[in-house]
Amino acid sequence: MRHVLYIILILLTVVAVGIGIAGRQGRLSRKPPIEVFPDMDRQLKLRPAQPNDFFPNGLSSQLPPRGTVARSEPLQTVTGPVYAFEDAPVNTGRVTGTTNFVETNPLPVTGQLLQRGRERFNIYCAPCHGALGDGNGINKKLGVMSAVANLQDKRIVEMADGEIFNTITFGKGLMGAHGPLVPVADRWAVVAYLRALQLSQLGSVDDLLPDQQAAFKK
């Protein structure tokens, strides 16, 4: 029994000492707080506009290298260059000043763009939607996701390019937003490659130009 009393007295003493050192919450004090890890409060760092011996001129704030200007590179669209800050279809997927989606891809559809779109599609889209975009990706086969959109469906085939871009950017349903992961140009590249995938599965000889049809029939 004595041992129990001793233990209780020791615990009460520890609690009393702790309260005496730390004080009760809610009280104001001019004394500095206890610093258990002082390096978290006082870190070695450069403070702006303050003297510092790290640089030869003794200043912490340095000017940019001579001849350099911080600015973004514009995207080359079918209507001309567009910067990232502009309210333009290439950045929003919508007709400027409206809520309507643009019908066609604003980037020139080239072999290089399609190749880039294929690479990005296989990284970000194929695990769920499948290499053909038919909704039979590895995640569905493994049972990770049971409901995956078939990108070959008529509903998606008939979507405006801007709406697909918007879905990639902000996500929809179980699909997360890829805007923070995939740059604007790469999102349009994925849209262009998806159209090529759809055409490869749903297209016919009648979709070819007359000279191409003749070459195909040979």
Image: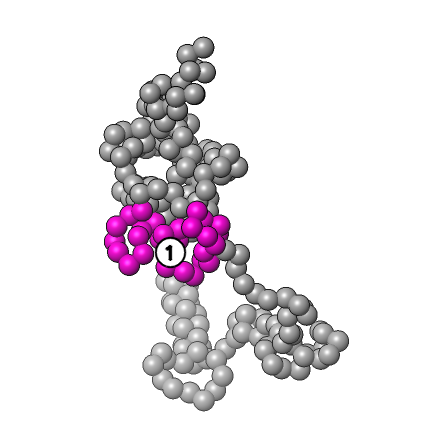
Segment tinted magenta in the rendering: 75-102
Q: Amino acid at mark 1?
A: Ala
Residue 75, placed above or below residue 15: above
Q: Percent position (x, y) of residue 87?
A: 37, 59
Determine the image quadrant of residue 217: top left
Q: Is residue 97 above or below residue 189?
A: below
Q: Residue furthest top?
A: 218
Count neighbours of disc 1 (C-alpha within 10 A) and say few if under 14, some if 14 to 19, many if 20 or more: some
Answer with left or right where residue 110 lies relative to residue 62.
left
Q: Residue visible at 60% across and 81% down?
A: 49
Which residue in the protein does label 1 denote? 88
| Residue located 40% across and 30% down the image | 196
Q: Name the spot of residue 6 as percent of width and height, x first.
A: 42, 68
Closer to the camera in the image, 17 or 99: 99
Residue farthest toward the front in the current orientation of the protein: 211
The kind of secondary structure the magenta stretch mainly shows is loop
Q: Looking at the figure, which quarter contains the C terminus? A: top left
Q: Is residue 211 magenta?
A: no
Indicate how the structure is coloured in the image: one colour
Q: Does residue 60 show up?
A: yes
Residue lying farthest bottom?
30
Point out residue 206 in the picture as x, y percentages from the top left corner. Answer: 33, 20
Label 1: which secondary element? loop
Write the residue at 38% across / 63% down.
Answer: 4
Is the N terminus in the top left, top right, bottom left or bottom right quadrant?
bottom left
> How many numbered marks, from 0 up?
1
Q: Between residue 19 and residue 108, name the one nearer to us.
A: 108
Q: 162 or 50, which is in the foreground?
A: 162
